[in-house]
């Protein structure tokens, strides 16, 4: 039942002891505020790292050719390994657990892509249709490259959004022609890719077979992308691919420099371990914050009880029940912790929103940090737990006060 007199008395007590009330409230406010900031910063780091990964397949393996560093069956080290189209077919046929098999070549350096009077220097790649499912390019307009483009060696091109904006401005550019090294390509689509801090959008792709014949890279494969079937570890694919290519190109399977292997599954596992460590750190800090808040409230409540010992004695002498005394002290504790905790939560969320807005205005170019946010449910739960803990902390001195005999309380100084 709502007791207006009791609430007025609690508020009057808080007004008479402004400094004490402020210091208690600030301790709770600061604890929740810092907890929200830590949670938001941890999530921002996680979002930023996943953004650098892009939206590509996490269960993927990329293979590039290198140079041998070990002798093998009479062959000297230092030989350059070169992949061919036959290597792709061998992997497709002899490696178990392959879901997607992609190939990609590129023109070394940056080449000028020309549209009328507009031009820009960008990287130009040749890739098959499966490559985009593995590397994570997302369609923005038009269409992606498809298997028929490669089968018919069509002169079509897929542009990154940053390339499109330079060459076509506000117009889409779909169906228009651009020129690379004197060869015309029809633009069939544009893509977005958050990887590499957005630099992956400064690229253009043509069908893999078209690229090989047009730019004189016949039967050359520079980079192979593989994704594993569900239930097949990428590490198992890596071992099979290394053994197969070692047999085909005559090098020691243990030669680490003969092949460059980029196992995304292992990278993802490492970062997930990092995220678990960050979350554990934030959890420990959160627990310590709650403990500090509880201790602070408990100490203040103990001081309040000591200061009001005579008052409590008078109340008991006039017939106040132990519960009325306990509830008065506990309610004061709850008011301080709940109001200050809620304000700390609002301040933390507001600061995270301000940081997120500033990043968006800056173009979101900060590496490894993106869209800091906090799980409001977790923050509210922490605040509620702190309020409950504060009530429990106030209950101990309140119970002690309720058990004081009136005659002893009246004698207190």
Image (cartoon, rainbow, N blue to C red):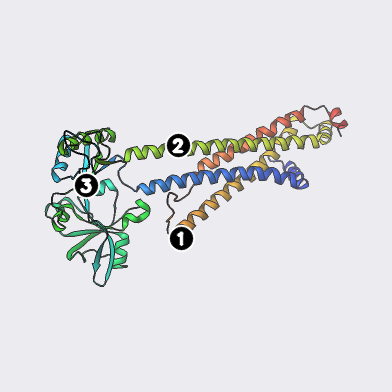
Crowdedness of circle 3 by 10 Å Cα count: few (<14), some, many (20+)?
Answer: some
Judge left or right: residue 395 versus residue 38. Answer: right
Q: Is residue 97 visible?
A: no
Residue lying at the far left of the rendered structure: 152
Q: Residue at x 39, y 46 (%)?
A: 50
Q: Image quadrant for the N terminus?
A: top right
How far apart marks 2 and 1 lie (CA) works out to 30 Å
Residue lying at the far right of the rendered structure: 411
Residue lying at the far bottom of the rendered structure: 117
Q: Nearer the viewer, residue 132 or 248?
A: 248
Of the image marks 3 and 1, the number of the one nearer the N terminus = 3
Q: Which residue is mark 2?
A: 276
The number of callouts visible is: 3
Q: Position of residue 25 (x, y in %)?
A: 67, 44
- Residue 361 shows which numbered tag? 1
Q: Which residue is mark 3?
A: 130
């Amino acid at each position: 039942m709502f007791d207006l007199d009791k609430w007025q008395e609690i508020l009057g007590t808080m007004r008479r002891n402004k400094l004490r009330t402020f210091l208690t409230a600030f301790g709770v406010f600061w604890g929740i505020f810092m907890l929200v900031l830590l949670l938001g910063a941890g999530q921002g780091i996680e979002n930023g790292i996943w953004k650098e990964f892009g939206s590509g397949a996490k269960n993927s393996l990329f293979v590039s050719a290198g140079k041998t560093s070990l002798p093998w069956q009479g062959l000297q080290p230092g030989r350059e390994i070169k992949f061919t189209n036959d290597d792709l077919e061998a992997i497709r046929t002899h490696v178990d657990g392959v879901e997607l098999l992609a190939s990609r070549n590129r023109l070394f350096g940056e080449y000028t892509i020309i549209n009328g009077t507009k031009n820009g220097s960008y990287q130009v790649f040749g890739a098959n249709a499966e490559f985009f499912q593995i590397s994570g390019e997302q369609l923005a307009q038009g269409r992606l490259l498809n298997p028929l483009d490669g089968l018919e060696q069509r002169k079509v091109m897929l542009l990154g959004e940053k390339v499109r904006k330079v060459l076509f401005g506000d117009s889409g550019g779909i169906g228009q022609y651009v020129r690379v090294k004197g060869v015309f390509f029809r633009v069939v689509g544009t893509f977005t890719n958050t990887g590499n801090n957005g630099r992956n959008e400064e690229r253009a792709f043509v069908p893999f077979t078209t690229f090989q014949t047009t730019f004189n890279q016949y039967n050359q494969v520079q980079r192979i992308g593989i994704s594993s079937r569900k239930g097949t570890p990428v590490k198992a694919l890596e071992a099979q691919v290394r053994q197969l290519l070692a047999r085909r190109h005559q090098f020691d399977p243990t030669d680490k420099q003969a092949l460059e292997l980029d196992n995304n599954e292992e990278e993802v596992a490492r970062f997930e371990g990092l995220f678990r460590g960050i979350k554990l750190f934030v959890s420990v800090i959160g627990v310590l914050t709650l403990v500090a808040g509880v201790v602070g409230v408990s100490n203040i409540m103990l001081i309040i009880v000591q200061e009001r010992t005579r008052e409590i004695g008078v109340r008991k002498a006039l017939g106040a029940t132990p519960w009325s005394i306990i509830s008065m002290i506990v309610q004061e504790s709850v008011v301080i912790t709940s109001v200050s905790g809620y304000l700390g939560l609002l301040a933390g969320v507001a600061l995270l929103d301000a940081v997120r807005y500033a990043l968006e205005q800056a173009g979101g170019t900060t590496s490894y940090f993106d869209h800091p946010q906090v799980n409001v449910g977790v923050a509210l739960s922490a605040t509620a737990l702190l309020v409950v803990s504060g009530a429990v902390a106030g209950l101990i001195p309140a119970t002690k006060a309720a058990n004081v005999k009136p005659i002893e309380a009246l004698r207190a100084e």
